Image (cartoon, coloured by chain):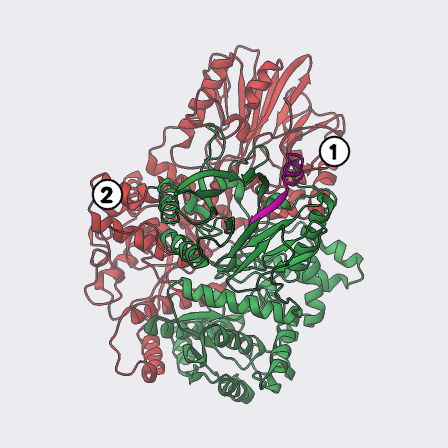
Chain colours: A red, B green
């Protein structure tokens, strides 16, 4: 039994393009390449297609494209193609999430998904009706158990809490499956591959059955898919792994003696997140039809790291760095940004904002007469910069990357319509402490350091008033990031975090800031998810809400 | 059997405040007020609590507050209180959406929701495990069938397509219920009450059973709840209706001779939407802890209507109108805005933007040298205005209301970080043609017209370049709104709309603009939902996606 797994990077909505990619892969593999070729979940529409699925004609068109592809591939091995189709049930959700079997020139059958994730970033109950009963493909006398992504994430021996009442994998084995194939579109989060492989290996070993897992790769808005398709023997041994963060294919002979390619996967956390951010940035820009990006360079660590990511994703010739000093900017903010630009080899330009600040203050002088300067004037600087960056973006057709990190976004230490402006918030899910770690890893990677030492060592500052530092307004980032981890990722209340030994006042200030910043987060661009719980599609909070977790 | 329905306006997250409101209502009704008192769905946390439900301590606190409330209300009639609690099942979603029975000083029982809406703005499968079996409360020997919102929206005789496999109402009747009580938080859309009452009446008649329906009222972010709790006799006759868009209570004697109060409900579509927008605006501002609002006045219809809504919601003394003319502004843009301000009795201020435009152009002169003026300079004007408005908002602590209508938001005829700035997008779900209709209705309502005639009759224009009108870039609004209706609300593809007889080129231009504006809509403030399909929480579209519905 020879199986070929295609680890593909589809473009959402591009039915024709995604089908053509499958066609080329199958044709280039050849007529005798395998007994079965397998794509990731929803490979035809791309995952996640979201509300495109509500357009009936989109579903009709998908099936038409799948039919054409089947006809084109007559004479090639059968293909399992991830797609959406109308549900066979007259009652319930309108669609099924399936693997279509393209065989002998036709769409011969389909195999449905049973467990539909509806948590975090997932909304599958919104669209899909669950499949009923084991989904088994018989091929050359061998029963292959087909499952789709979540179907394999409900093993009673692996998880403390079962989210679903059935276990499709157990049902497949009971129904006589001799091999398990899981087609997935499983988004990246840091460290998740270890968990995936441990879980998959455990299932293979428990049922004494070979298991093949093919995952999507590529960035789609806030989600990055890391690929790393893999296979396990009936003993639970890893026998193949595809490349991380790249399109790849993986050929397996399940009954043969030879294991497949095992691509190494020994990233440090910093390197793993870096790779995800680079892929997410590259794909967002490419898939929206752009080539170039610009970044406002403040001389700080966040914008320095984002510029470095942009260069790796797009090439130095496609990145512009924009310095916008004010009278409150330190000398270092300019010299450090210029040094970074030189180290990255990108073009930089300098647009001082003092003249525009003066024009705004003159225009507002009447309304503001007699009132002290406050955060209004600080926000004004950030908004002037955001407007200048958007003017460059509009004039030159390059996308603006915003540079806020997760710690800032969490507590609202950012100006809406100012430094939050951008098409993509590259590091919005990276805590400030991890921003530093990635920057240091990057410098160590070589060939030469790119982020100037001064950027790594000076006190973080928004430089919106004289001698300001972030720590005037916020707890030290080490402490802040710990509190945020418990609150955001572990859903702990202030009381629970205080019970861990953190200061009462600090914790309540942080949780209050988090709540008060919902209105800002509502209006942020997509940010690339790298943690278990990112702001964005997986964080759905009311805005006009009172605090319930008050200090006592 | 005397039942008292409490049509409440809870604040999301305000467990103590919402409980106190119930306590006051029950106490003021008195110890002998009814045999049962009923609140809306999730009245304790407020609907929708969204991801607050993921905080376990929030759920624990809810139950603690419910227990205290039960103790406070000992000696008063039993109360059915909408709340969330841990699911009794060790498998599945963590919570249940329930009506808690507060009786004899304790939380005596709970009745669960069976059908969990997960479409449009709803995400209930994200949190809740469905109840199993009929939920029956026996009170003084009478079996009362308890259902929660969606449970009653799956009647096989009323709907062509059943979304769910079970019908909890049929099960309640089969189990011997002699009366049906449905607790709801059913969001407003224009015309929905007609459908609700028709459906509820049909169910009462079909099963020959009295039916009581209590709905939440008030605005919560993008959703407005319109109240209009109601009751039907076993013949399907409407026997009571509470006030629309207001807190109210409704007392019913089911076995008695006297029908309850039937509040009139003969709104025109314009008046109904107006009421929803006023309530949504008032509650958003109040529930976020603000009192005052400001609106940029362009002399156009959209900002005029939004200012009028703000005055009705907050009082004229709490609304500031800001005129920001440029050299491209017509004389009418200033005189019409001033006339509107006088008619509304609000303070206005004028901040010309020419000086700031000059400062930006001087700063950008080097980068833009030799390049023609284009949309960049138009966006710049909008962003200068957006920044001025935010400066006023920041300095004076009043919320900025943005003024874009649904037609503009659909096709992206707006400047991100410019005229889209704001805490709330008041009319973002109102098509331009309906904006005109509401404005004319408002003028006719009296006592005197508020929107100047010139605003109603002049050609719509963004006035960002000389002699510009909206129709330079867009089809006439009558035509545009029809195409958008089919595309956005009916999910029709360009091909399907063209098949209705619309021009091929116009339709494809519109659908392409809609797709191209996803990145803008991602970053908009909440908009008040008034149609079946609003942009916002019920519109979940990928951004980095290719068009699939291409011209042939």
Q: Which residues are magenta?
A: B169-185
Residue neighbourhood size for the residue with mark 1, other residues' Cα within 10 Å, grouped as few (<14), some (14–19), many (≥20): some
Front of the two marks 1 and 2: 2
First reached walking from the N terminus: tag 1 or tag 2:
1
Residue neighbourhood size for the residue with mark 2, other residues' Cα within 10 Å, grouped as few (<14), some (14–19), many (≥20): some
Q: Position of residue A160 (x, y in %)?
A: 41, 25
* Residue B549 falls within the magenta-colored stretch: no
Residue toward you, B103 or A251: B103
Q: Position of residue B174 (x, y in %)?
A: 67, 35
Quarter of the rendering containing residue A158: top left
Q: Is residue B413 visible?
A: yes
> Numbered disc 1: what chain?
A
Number of dots carrying numbers:
2
Instruction: Label 1: state its secondary structure.
Output: helix
- Give the left or right position of residue B350, taking residue B470 as reference: left
Which quarter of the rendering shows the N terminus of chain A?
top right
Q: CA distance from mark 1 to mark 2?
A: 63 Å
Q: On the image, numbered disc 1 is attached to which residue?
A: A72
Q: Position of residue A433 (x, y in %)?
A: 27, 45
Labelled disc at residue B412: none
Q: Position of residue B339 (x, y in %)?
A: 52, 88
- Residue at x 31% of width, y 54% of height: A512
Residue toward you, A87 or B459: A87
Labelled disc at residue A498: 2
Residue toward you, B237 or A456: B237
> Numbered disc 2: what chain?
A
As drawn, B136 above or below B377: above
Q: Is residue B550 visible?
A: no
As drawn, B353 above or below A3: below
- Give the left or right position of residue B43, taking residue A499 as reference: right
């Amino acid at each position: 039994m020879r199986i070929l797994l295609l680890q593909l990077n589809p473009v959402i909505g591009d039915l024709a393009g995604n089908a053509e990619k499958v066609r080329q892969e199958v044709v280039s593999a050849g007529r005798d390449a395998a007994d079965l070729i397998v794509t990731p979940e929803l490979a035809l529409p791309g995952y996640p297609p979201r509300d495109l699925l509500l357009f009936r004609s989109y579903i009709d068109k998908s099936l038409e494209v799948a039919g054409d592809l089947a006809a084109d591939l007559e004479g090639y091995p059968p293909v399992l193609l991830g797609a959406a189709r109308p549900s066979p049930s007259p009652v319930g959700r309108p669609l099924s999430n399936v693997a279509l079997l393209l065989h002998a020139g036709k769409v011969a059958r389909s195999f449905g998904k049973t467990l539909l994730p509806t948590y975090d970033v997932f909304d599958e109950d919104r669209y899909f009706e669950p499949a009923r009963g084991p989904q088994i493909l018989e091929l050359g006398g061998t029963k292959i158990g087909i499952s789709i992504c979540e179907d394999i994430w409900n093993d009673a021996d692996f998880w403390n809490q079962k989210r679903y009442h059935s276990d499709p994998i157990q049902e497949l084995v009971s129904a006589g499956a001799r091999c398990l194939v899981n087609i997935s579109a499983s988004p990246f989060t840091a460290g998740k591959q270890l968990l995936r492989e441990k879980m998959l290996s455990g299932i293979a070993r428990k049922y004494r059955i070979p298991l093949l897992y093919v995952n999507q790769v590529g960035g789609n808005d806030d989600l990055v898919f890391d690929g790393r398709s893999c296979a396990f023997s009936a003993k639970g041994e890893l026998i193949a792994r595809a490349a991380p963060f790249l399109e790849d294919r993986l050929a397996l002979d399940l009954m043969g003696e030879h294991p497949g390619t095992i691509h190494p996967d020994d990233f440090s956390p910093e390197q793993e997140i870096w790779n995800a951010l680079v892929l997410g940035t590259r794909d967002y820009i490419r898939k929206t039809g752009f080539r170039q990006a610009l970044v406002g360079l403040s001389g700080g660590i966040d914008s320095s790291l984002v510029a470095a990511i942009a260069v790796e994703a797009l090439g130095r010739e496609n990145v512009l760095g924009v310095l916008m000093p004010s009278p409150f900017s330190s000398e270092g903010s300019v010299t450090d940004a210029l040094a970074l630009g030189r180290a990255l080899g990108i073009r930089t330009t300098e647009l001082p904002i003092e003249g525009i600040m003066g024009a705004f203050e003159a225009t507002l002088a009447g309304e503001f007469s007699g009132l002290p300067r406050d955060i209004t004037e600080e926000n004004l600087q950030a908004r002037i910069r955001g407007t200048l960056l958007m003017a460059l973006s509009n004039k030159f057709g390059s996308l603006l990357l915003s540079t806020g990190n997760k710690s800032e976004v969490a507590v609202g230490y950012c100006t809406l319509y100012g430094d939050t402006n951008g098409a993509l918030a590259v590091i919005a899910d990276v805590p400030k402490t991890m921003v530093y770690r990635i920057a240091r890893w990057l410098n160590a990677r070589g060939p030469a350091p790119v982020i100037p030492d001064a950027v790594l060592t000076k006190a973080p500052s928004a430089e919106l008033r004289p001698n300001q530092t972030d720590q005037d307004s916020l707890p030290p980032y080490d402490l802040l990031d710990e509190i945020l981890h418990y609150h955001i990722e572990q859903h702990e209340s202030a009381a629970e975090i205080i019970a861990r030994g953190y200061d009462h006042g600090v914790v309540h200030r942080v949780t209050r800031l988090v709540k008060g910043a919902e209105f800002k987060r509502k209006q942020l661009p997509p940010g690339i998810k790298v943690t278990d719980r990112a702001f964005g599609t997986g964080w759905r909070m009311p805005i006009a809400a009172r605090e319930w977790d008050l200090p006592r």
